[in-house]
Image: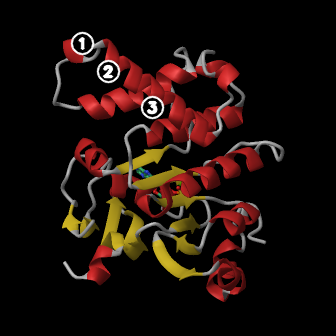
Amino acid sequence: MNSATNDIILQTNKITKKFGGLTAVNMVDVEIERGSVKTIIGPNGSGKTTFFNLITGVLPPTEGSILFNGKDITNSPPHQRSQHGISRSYQITNIFPYLTAFENIRLSIQGHYLKGKIKLSDIIRRAGDIEVLHNETYGIADIVGLDPVRLFVPATLLPHAEQRKLEIAMALGTKPSLLLLDEPTAGMSVEEIPEVIDAILRVKERFGKDLTVILVEHKMDVVMRISEEIIVLSNGKKIAQGQPQEIKENKDVLQAYLGSTDEDLI
Ligand code: ADP
Ligand code: MG
């Protein structure tokens, strides 16, 4: 592997997903540099979530390949990709509602350690293990800025922004090198959005080059604050890629958003 390949954490080659007659993702090529923050935008139904599902292995592609750290993972199952460092949060909040925030995070860390390797009875064999686990849980909660007072409240009672931060914390529990965030500010009030953006920025600052982030996001002010580069999908195709300012002025992008029911691009 030469150094140029080394700097690319994720590469897709003509990745395609068809659902019957509908091509949700159409021959998409991307190269994601290690440690970067990229945003995928595109009108509703343009294939953003499907693209994430292909990267995480939730869906098999119809065509094309995916390389992660230079290795072909096109046919690897989701749990293997997670073990190798790919983690995600969902567009729809996905937490254990009646467990506390603390337990939600701890479970994600435990799940990562234990996957297929250790028997359930080994989970808390030594008191020291639990202490390490708990310290790690507190550490992650702190990075995303979860309110410590609320860590022991059932997750379902947390305000929406805190639930989103909890999901990011759970994704971090699996020690990812690639974090995929699907619309982390979806359904959020104007006051809540900065809280989640700050959490993402803090995570990025804490892990630096060791963490690459790809997010799907609609709100252009959020995109502008967080991302270095934007990839635009429309009808499953990649129609543009570039710096936020270039994308805002790109004719194809503006055209794709015309008539869309999404919020205005600008
Ligand atoms: P986005 O996240 O950009 O809004 P999606 O990736 O969710 O778009 O969807 C892209 C297209 O694929 C849409 O037309 C959607 O209806 C379709 N689609 C997504 N998932 C499935 C599925 N499991 N079965 C059939 N069609 C799907
Ligand atoms: Mg989506």
Residue under the point 54% across and 52% down: 206
Residue under the point 22% across and 82% down: 2
Tag 2 residue: 129
Disc 2 element:
helix
Tag 3 residue: 136
Q: CA distance from mark 3 to mark 2?
A: 11 Å
Tag 1 residue: 125
253 or 142, nearer to the observer: 142
Q: Residues within 10 Å of mark 1 (few under 14, many from 20)?
A: few
Asked where in the image residue 141 lies, by quadrant, the reply is: top right
User: Reading the chain from its start, which is encountered first: label 3 or label 1?
Assistant: 1
- Relative to residue 113, is residue 175 depicted above or below? below
Q: Can residue 185 be seen in the rendering of this structure?
A: no
Disc 3 element:
helix
Disc 1 marks a residue whose amino acid type is Arg
Disc 3 marks a residue whose amino acid type is Glu
Q: What sort of colour scheme is used for the picture?
A: secondary structure
Coordinates of residue 188 in the picture (x, y in percent): 74, 42
Question: Mark 1 CB in 8 Å range of ligand 1?
Answer: no
- Relative to residue 78, is residue 99 depicted above or below? above
Residue under the point 26% across and 54% down: 60
Q: Is 237 left or right of 79, judged from the image as shown?
A: right
Q: Is 60 left or right of 169, judged from the image as shown?
A: left
Q: Residues within 10 Å of mark 2 (few under 14, many from 20)?
A: few
